[in-house]
Amino acid sequence: MQATFQALTDAFVPSVQPEYASPFHETDMGVHNYIILSLNHNISIQQQLNHHIVPLAYPTAIMLNSAATQLVNHHQAQAFPQCLFPGGGMFSHLSRKDRIRTLAALGNLDIDLYVLPSPFQNNAGMVKYVTDALSRFSLFGYYSEWPAYGSTRVLPPDDRCLEFFPLTWQQVGYPGVSLGYRDFRGFLLTMAEVKT
Amino acid sequence: MKTDPDVIVIGAGGGGPVVAKELGELGIRVLVLEAGPWYGNKKWHEPNENRGITKESSNPGDLDGSLYRQQLTRLENDMNDPLSGKFRWGAADRRRTPWYRNIPDRALLWQSAGIGGSTMHYYANSPRAFPEAIEEWPIDYEELIPYYEKVEATLPVEFAPTVSKEALFYYGAEKAGFSMNQTLNVTSSGYRPQPNAILPPNEHLMDPNYSMEELSHMEGCTLSGHCGQGCPYGPSLEKMAKRSTTVSYVPLAMKTGNVSFRPNTFVTKVLTEYSASGKREATGVQIRDTWTGETEELRATVVVMAAGCVETPRLWLNSDLPYNPWVGRGLTNHYMDMVTGTFDEETLMEILGSRSVNPFIGHTSGGRLDYPGLGMIETIGESPGLSAQLLFGFSQYGYNSLHGSASDMWDQRGRLVGSELEKAMEDYSRTLTLSAITDDEVQFHNRVELDPHITDEHGKVPCVHYEPSKKSKKRREQLTKIATDILRQAGATKVHRTDLPSNYFIHLQSTMRMGYVVDTTCEAYQVERLYVADNSADYNALGGPNPTLTTQALATRTAELLASKYFT
Ligand SMILES: Cc1cc2nc3c(=O)[nH]c(=O)nc-3n(C[C@H](O)[C@H](O)[C@H](O)COP(=O)(O)OP(=O)(O)OC[C@H]3O[C@@H](n4cnc5c(N)ncnc54)[C@H](O)[C@@H]3O)c2cc1C
């Protein structure tokens, strides 16, 4: 499962040079873990006395591999003989572009929904919702401060603490939490002017 | 509150606290029930970690600005993660999942539970509705004006200061042939600063003798750009710069001595009885404590629903109230899109005298262009994670890289991945993003209904369906083109269009429409003593302007009418 989500973030987000990826040596700064956490922290329902969480990460990994297999079988994607992410399924045998093709096919429902695992089987709404969320989660995980929670990043939110300044914030020129900026250029209009 | 309150208000978001404050001032005793946590109240020192030392709070002395500042960390993942952020639709305890809504599509329905509700993360844009849109309502625009004025004075509302991104926007709008609209009552197209519920910058902001640390404890906006993270800057809780209801109407309501707020309390049912005259009337509510699961029934003379556009109809439907085909129907969401222009340093130097726009500086949205008949366009400057997610990670167009050559209009469109994404984000500090916000048509088929199969601890969960009308689609297309033109005129060298999915919800409105579900006083036609005071009472989407000010004006009016009907 881990490998499938590594293959996913590898296709979505820029790879970080290994020297910057420290202390974790992950080119996605561990964002695949954020996706797994998010998918497993999404839905809970009530059944009789039980309040259940519906874990979505595992069935989502199966869905990605199943869709990849369909694309390969229909010659819409080409599988490398070797697995690019050890332990992964068919999705991890595809080039980045073909992984994106697979996601596009899922998003457009251009696949056989019957062969997908529950809760995705013949459930177009759920397939669209989750496929889309994969991209949102990847980008939000990567460009927010999440990776900088470092060794605490997979703990419950109130137990996390920032261990360093987020690398992506540095790259894009965002100074992070700010007390304010001296960029006041005056008022174009005031309430007093429109009230008279 | 030891004895029964006179009025129970359900929800402490955009609308609820307004009703509470107005009624409190008239000597009417109000209990506000809120599903989410309370930030900035000493009775809940660690509001996400335990249930605190009491159930409700009515003493303004409980409010604490430094606690608020400590809790609102201004970090976008900590605050805004839709699943586990402090501002999310879910219980205070973040180890739990959010409360589920079934939206069978690509979707982001962005609401927040807690005292302040979705105004905790809103940008505080507080324009009035377009008068021409109110013409379709069963009440007149003129009738709303005194209530608009009252809310504008109370929040208070002031036009946004100009910072780099707004200066660039006004420059582009002017070159695109628009002129400034110097008014609050918009009848023709033009640009203007946003009327925002944000305190104007402190007069010393530009004076280097005052440190930013000092300024952040003084009154006035520091242009920190943290509107979406709640903005905890100011000398005390009720003087925080961004006027979420938590820091505006909630303290004012408490000061009347007649209003108590109870967080962590989910209303699961509105209770009704038949009156002597045979009419169905509200008598109270059933609640569930979100920490302990304990349930209780509470009674009042009048019940006001202000749970937002999804939960108000859901609560009606879960309460077995009389059938009305329009409950949950007519949902509008301002069918939005985003375009992002990238500028080179020389162009910016010429226009702004600096090499970057730094879109994260200033009010998150400080400039707007009104266009009656189509909607509006506004500037947006979010932090990097939210920007990347919404601009480049969320689209109905698909992946830019799979689509071959782009159109004449846009250099890129849809989702960006890998090196394209990296490049786009590298340019972040030299971008300006404009949001196109459509005058969305009311359609019966757009709706909130109960999911027949899925139940959570509060009953059947809501299922949300939305598909814009042909007219809304056309209007969005036109607005997006105008926004693109403004960026080009300002000198953008590259323009990216997001093409947002239709189920991107931030301005939900009109699911309990006036004239269909509630009458012109916002009392339910079929249930007496039951009122609605949130975005759901709107007859339509206001022509495009951001909805909250109108909800607050209407809530002020509703409080007055309710008081004179039941409490004189
Ligand atoms: C990113 C973003 C930016 C925005 N910016 C602007 C802006 O600049 N200007 C603008 O006008 N609008 C803006 N909006 C929209 C704005 O947030 C809403 O218009 C406004 O908050 C709606 O008020 P409301 O009272 O209808 O609902 P809410 O503010 O959502 O309040 C409803 C409250 O009821 C509570 N509740 C729900 N169900 C129950 C229940 N059963 N029991 C007890 N409590 C319950 C909720 O927890 C919540 O606190 C923005 C929204 C987003 C997402």
Image (cartoon, coloured by chain):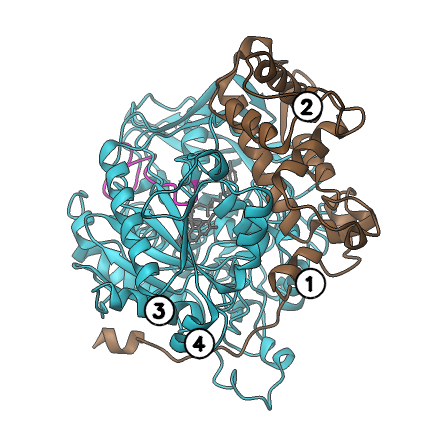
Chain colours: A brown, B cyan
Which quarter of the picture shows residue B177? bottom left
- Of helix, strand and loop, which one carries label 3? helix
Residue tagged 2 = A61
Q: Is residue B121 left or right of residue A117?
A: left
Q: Are marks 1 and 4 in contact (CB under 8 Å)?
A: no
Q: Residues within 10 Å of mark 3 (few under 14, many from 20)?
A: few
**Amino acid type at mark 2:** Ala
The mark that comes first in sequence, 3 or 4, is 3
Residue tagged 1 = B70
Taking the spot 24% from the left edge, 63% from the top edge, the residue there is B176
The mark that comes first in sequence, 3 or 1, is 1
Residue in the foreground of this view, choosing between A29 and A90: A90
Q: Which residues are magenta?
A: B505-523
Residue tagged 3 = B153
Q: Considering only vertical position in the picture, is B261 above or below B185?
A: above
Nearer the observer: mark 1 or 4; the answer is 4
Q: Are marks 4 and 2 in contact (CB under 8 Å)?
A: no
Q: Are marks 2 and 3 in contact (CB under 8 Å)?
A: no
Which quarter of the picture shows residue B301? top left
Chain letter for the residue marked with disc 2 in the picture: A
Residue tagged 4 = B349
**Amino acid type at mark 4:** Met
Q: Are marks 3 and 1 in contact (CB under 8 Å)?
A: no
Q: CA distance from mark 2 to mark 3?
A: 53 Å
Q: Is residue A15 left or right of residue B232?
A: right
Nearer the observer: mark 2 or 1; the answer is 2
Q: Is residue B179 left or right of residue A104?
A: left
- Of helix, strand and loop, which one carries label 1? helix
Q: Residues within 10 Å of mark 4 (few under 14, many from 20)?
A: few
Residue in the foreground of this view, choosing between B362 and B164: B164
